[in-house]
Image (cartoon, helix red, strand yellow):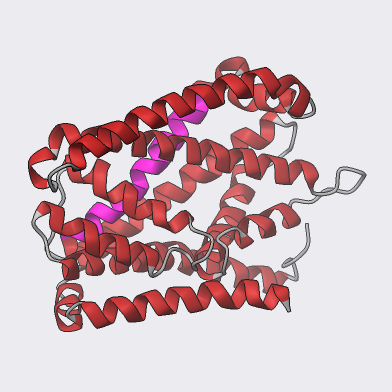
Amino acid sequence: MSLLKLGVLPIALSLGLLAAIAAFVDIGAVWTALSAVSIRALGAAFVVVQLQILLSALRWRFTARRLNLDLPLGEALHEYYIGSSLNQILPGGVAGDVVRAYRQRQTGPSGWKRPAAAIVLERVSGQLAFVLLIGLGLFAWPLVLAERLPVGVTEIALIVAGFLSVASGACFAVFRKSASSRLSGMREDLLEVFWHRKALAVQVGLSSLIVLTYVMTFAIASHAVGAPLSVIACITIVPLSLLTMLVPASVGGWGTREMAAAALWPIFGYSPEQGVAASLLYGIFSLVSGGFPALVLMICDVWRGRLGKT
């Protein structure tokens, strides 16, 4: 029953938020914006999403190889298409990662622990790069957008930024002090994945490019609905909209992402309807561009009797 609730509640939340958005915005204006999307925008988004999955597969392969796991690039691509698509349509946002770990399980005592560790560390690399982008945007809010924000928000943003900086430093100090006791079993894995033999440069480079593709896809979607975004917009409101997708209480960020876009797009002179349309189109771009190849791969797996096997 609890598992059923875990699946039903995120779906109900996403549907509820989308219904609430529909009640407060002009659906006709949203549909008009979506109907103006060009084939060129669809093609551009499709290419960017393919690049995104390729880079993600490369990051996963690099992380796995640092943990002495054999993961050919073709197999990494195959599994990443399926896993990322499942993350977008199943509650929780991690079901696809679980499937990836299960399908990479090994015979012997390690089972799927080592493959799971590679996937977790690969995702951590991505989240760290995303947090850095949000931090950059956080400092840009009061410095660049002060005239567009309500009175008092600049001071609040600076206080929050300062608090986060101090808190991050404190957390790092605590982490350093307790790392030897709490992460003794993972220490070598962490060093191998993120530090030894120029690993940090590879992780930062790949993860930064992957985050850039997420932002580019959102920017293409927004431009396609008649709301082109500046560079400042791309590092401020887009990351915050994407951040809502990490909320596990929704399905693939549907509803939470649109709610954020409706509130944030007016800061740059666009209507809430354009923000909602851009967010919906971003979701469609991501789902179709990654989902269609994933569906083809899953059909091929079923045809070959490979689905669910190592």
Majority secondary structure of the magenta segment?
A: helix
Position in image of residue 91 (x %, y %): 57, 68
Q: Residue furthest front?
A: 152
Q: Looking at the picture, how far across and down is residue 82, in whole percent?
A: 58, 61
Q: Is residue 221 magenta?
A: yes
**191 relative position to 87: left or right:** right
Say which quarter of the image contains residue 266: bottom left
* x, y percent for residue 29: 14, 78
Q: Residue shown at 72%/70% (left/top)? A: 304
As rendered, which of 122 and 270 lies closer to the eye?
Answer: 270
Answer yes or no: is residue 228 visible: no
Residue 226 in percent (x, y) is at 11, 63
Residues shaded magenta: 202-223
Residue under the point 15% across and 73% down? 33
Horizontal side, residue 74 vs residue 290: left or right: right
Residue 261 appears in the picture as rendered: yes
In the image, residue 177 sits, relative to residue 58, either above or below, namely above
Front-lying residue, 95 or 197: 95
For residue 32, side relative to residue 190 (left or right):
left
Quadrant the N terminus occupies: bottom right
